[in-house]
Amino acid sequence: MSKKLKEPNLEALAAKNIFDKVNDGDWYQYSKEPKIQAIVKHSAQIVQQMNDVAKTDLDQATSMLREFLPNASQSADIYFPLTSIEHPTKLFIGEETFINANLQILSAGKVTIGAHCFIGPNCQLFTPNHHPSNKELRRQGWQYDGPITIGDDCWFGGSVIVLPNVTIGDNVVVGAGSVVTKDVPSNTIVAGNPARIIKHND
């Protein structure tokens, strides 16, 4: 859920380009935005192709992955299979970062993963938001995306979930199975659902 939730101004949004809406964190209806749908569907096809190729030719799959993720460091190491990366140009990965299998990133919000991070298997990074109390807006498919930022030297255990509009500082350890719902300061260990600070690494 957004830190500062605003109701959608439907009249103003109708005159706005979909990519401007997404970049500005504005509301949009995914079901009525064919350009966004096309990106997501194409990305799903590429992910499946890479996963299939990786079964027999890891070098070729890795080459495909480099092309798929133009903003990932060449020294980043990402294991197959991938679950999904819906908007690959919105994903930024720093040098020497390792990401284990079954990474899932939804949807169009910018996701930044710093340098020298360890991201465990089955981690999920979610940027979409829906209205928490207005069921009519949810029925109509309105959503908006909030960015996720992960600093340098972070270590995520397996099956960590990070929600929209979350910034995680440098040198943060997130315990396996945790759900990170709010910002995390640098040099901390957090765990739980919702994740809470359990130790400071000074």
Image (spheres, rainbow, N blue to C red):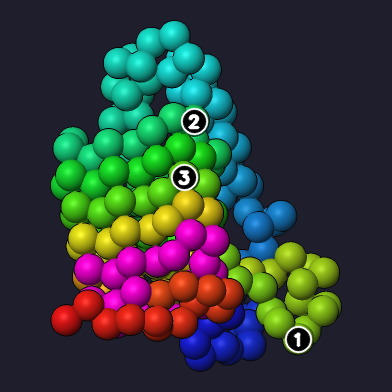
Gap between marks 1 and 3, in whole Å? 33 Å
Specify the amino acid type for callout 3.
Pro
Q: Is residue 11 left or right of residue 124?
A: right
Q: Position of residue 158 (x, y in %)?
A: 48, 52
Gap between marks 3 and 2, in whole Å? 10 Å
Is residue 194 visible to the viewer in this orientation of the structure? yes
The local secondary structure at tag 3 comes to: loop
Give the mark, 3 or 2, whose residue is nearer the N terminus: 2
Q: Residues within 10 Å of mark 3 (few under 14, many from 20)?
A: many
Q: Quadrant of the C terminus?
A: bottom left
Q: Position of residue 16 (x, y in %)?
A: 52, 69
Q: Is residue 134 above or below residue 156?
A: below
Start and end of the magenta stretch? 171-189
Gap between marks 2 and 1, in whole Å? 36 Å
- The residue under label 2 is 81
Give the mark, 1 or 3, whose residue is nearer the N terminus: 3
Q: Quadrant of the N terminus?
A: bottom right
| Mark 3 or 2, closer to the camera | 3
Is residue 145 visible to the viewer in this orientation of the structure? no
Q: Is residue 181 above or below residue 105?
A: below
The local secondary structure at tag 1 comes to: loop
- The residue under label 3 is 121
Q: Nearer the viewer, residue 48 or 14?
A: 48
The number of numbered discs placed on residues in the rendered structure image is 3
Q: Residues within 10 Å of mark 1 (few under 14, many from 20)?
A: few
- The residue under label 1 is 133
Q: Position of residue 17 (x, y in %)?
A: 50, 63
